[in-house]
Amino acid sequence: MIDTHCHLLWRIDDGPSSPMASVDLARAMVEQGVDAALCTPHYSTRFPTRTAATRARFEELGRSLAELGVPLRIALAAEVSSKLALSVPLEELRERSVGGFVVVELEPGAAAEVPVLVAERLRGARLTTVFAHPERCRSVRFDPAALDEARGGGALVQVVASCLVGRWGRDVAEGGWALLDTGRADVLASDAHTATGSVQRLRQVVERVGLRYGREVVDELTVRTPAEILSLEPARSG
């Protein structure tokens, strides 16, 4: 699995609390079948992270993983709040992209028109939106078609695996499955924060998705599309 949403960097946002906690999380992800991960520290009014600080922390983590023999490839972007995606200079969003893809959080209270507004603004700068947490967004749960125009313009929709097993309650779980059932989900990600959190059920959730939709769909959600986002060659199995 290639994970396009996780919080591996310590003391940057609400992720790990120490360098060792970051390494422990990386190990837990590998144990759950993740071989590459996109670090997406929050970029929001609550967490106004700076690119220089996140880059330094990212490089330090990379060295630690190599020294300790943790076989996890990592890349760096951000999880940008929809408010900042619509307001900060586009260059700031470009700095927090990976290969031209920007992960944008759809907060619970985001209005129905936000996906189109964000996707159009980023597309004008030759950036592609990857919408995170659509299952938690009430307007999307009420009308999943709110994502269709944005997806039609090239935006991607990312569902968090743990939501499917009730991490944020029944309504959110139903919203996540509805996106998968209707073919509106393009990527499945972990949103991992700690080694002892919901990441421990990641493999179980992926297997459950496979039983419901088939291996081909799982590969598209967890390997092929994520590999395009990170410009990676998927690890070969067997």
Image (cartoon, helix red, strand yellow):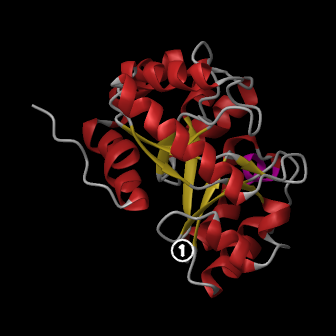
Q: Name, please, the residue furthest toward the top.
A: 196
Residue 102 in percent (x, y) is at 60, 63
Q: Can residue 179 be seen? A: no
Q: Name, please, the residue furthest toward the left.
A: 238
Residue 62 in percent (x, y) is at 46, 40
In-front residue for pair 52/113: 52
Q: Which residues are magenta?
A: 139-143
User: Is residue 142 one of those drawn in magenta?
Assistant: yes
Q: Secondary structure at mark 1?
A: helix
Q: Please, is residue 20 above or below residue 74 in the view?
A: above
Tell me which secondary structure the magenta stretch mostly adopts: helix
Q: Name, please, the residue furthest toward the bottom.
A: 124
- Write down the residue under mark 1: 152
Q: Quadrant of the C terminus?
A: top left
In-front residue for pair 2/55: 55
Mark 1: few/some/many CA within 10 Å (<14, 14-19, 20+): few
Residue type for callout 1 = Gly
**Horizontal side, residue 171 vs residue 65: left or right:** right
**Residue at left offset 56%, top offset 83%:** 126
Q: Can residue 93 be seen? A: yes
Q: Please, is residue 80 above or below residue 4 in the view?
A: below
